[in-house]
Amino acid sequence: MALRNFINRNLLFSKCPLRTSQRLSHFTFVPDTVSASEGETQRMNLFQAINNSLDTALTSDPTAIIFGEDVAFGGVFRCTVGLQEKHGKSRVFNTPLCEQGIAGFGIGAATAGATAIAEIQFADYILPAFDQICNEAAKYRYRSGGIYDCGSLTIRAPCSAVGHGAVYHSQSPEAFFSHCPGLKVVVPRGPIKAKGLLLSCIRDKNPCIFLEPKILYRSAVEQVPVKEYTMPLSNADILVEGDDITLVGWGTQVHVLREVCQLAKDQLNVSCELIDLVTILPWDKETIAQSVKKTGRLLIAHEAPLTSGFGAEIAASIQRDCFLNLEAPIERVTGFDTPFPHMFEPFYMPDKWRCLEAVKRVVNY
């Protein structure tokens, strides 16, 4: 009902050129930079940065293997292109079309001493592997009393919307895995973060879920360090400093919120502080809490549906820790509690205009 009302309301404005251009504008990618101390850099988009990170892992670790549906020829998004030719068929190979089998094989390989890197072709199809990931991989160390573990397991999966993927190719499943102790869940916002965070996941001694916003594969381009490059997990990034309201997102939504920061400054004279959560589990509560204690207001935006989205966990935790600092109720701007629609996918998205309206509500409360 909420989605239908929102669509109907926006369609009333469809004859207005301004409203049409607003709806078609999803986000503008803003590249990160690295310090000159990181050495030589190379222009890469997101999938090239992931490919480079995987190549680094295979080169530096003789036990590393990559497997999944179609990874031998490079995968549907080309993230593994050229790796089998360089490292051999025994280290980069296809699997049957069976997500449960891919996860189960990865658990076994990691337990036997390999650094296992699995690809699920789309995050939407990770659910058949849910039992293996959450009941086996996440709990293996715990239930064996630390005798065994499958910590050297990383599962990559393209996630989130591209504007036309709809029911089975646009979902963001991070909240499902955030409810499972024993996992780490990471979402990069661009090529630099993708290379550094993926290599950190591969070398982390806990099973990791690495979710890659597929719309950024080609649209996000940065100067990425060529050398081995890692970044700490579970550290949120403050991208824009501000005083009036804290905005929190991850993945693609970070770029949406960056535009909201500028719109809020220009139209409302509101100073926004923008935080990229980076790691969903374990998440960096301290950075967000310190920001909210300064601004007194919080808005969280994510593409997944509202109910039980990870924004709910952030809101509950910050409300408890920052209750006396809050000047307004915490606001969430999210997808709707419906399956991802097809022709109405642009209306489903928490775009900059929906987020800007939420900023107005919070600051005027």
Image (cartoon, grey):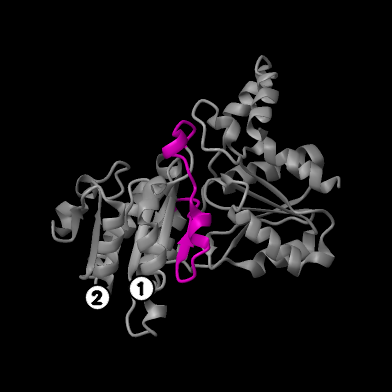
Q: Does residue 34 show up?
A: no
Closest to the observer, 318 or 105: 105
Residue 259 can be seen in this image:
yes
**Above or below — where is 152 with respect to 251?**
below
Q: Residue at x 49, y 29 (%)?
A: 342
Residue 298 x %, y %: 73, 55
* Residue 23, percent from left and from top: 61, 28
> Which sits earlier in the primary sequence, circle 2 or circle 1?
2
For the N terminus, the image quarter is top right
Estimate how packed mark 1 is, as few (under 14), some (14 to 19) or many (20 or more) residues with alpha carbons within 10 Å.
many
The answer to whether residue 341 is left or right of residue 66 is: right
Q: Report the Cα–Cα distance between label 2 and label 1.
A: 10 Å
User: Where is residue 110 drawn, in percent x and y?
Assistant: 28, 71
334 in magenta: no
Residue occupying the point 65% across, 60% down: 314
Q: Of helix, strand and loop, which mostly describes the magenta segment?
A: loop
Relative to 143, does residue 85 appear above or below in the rendering?
above
SS class, disc 2:
loop
User: Relative to 110, is 313 above or below?
Assistant: above
Residue that badge 1 annotates: 151
Identity, as a three-letter code, of the amino acid under mark 1: Gly
Q: Nearer the viewer, residue 163 or 53?
A: 163
User: Which residue does the numbered mark 2 point to in the structure image?
Assistant: 113
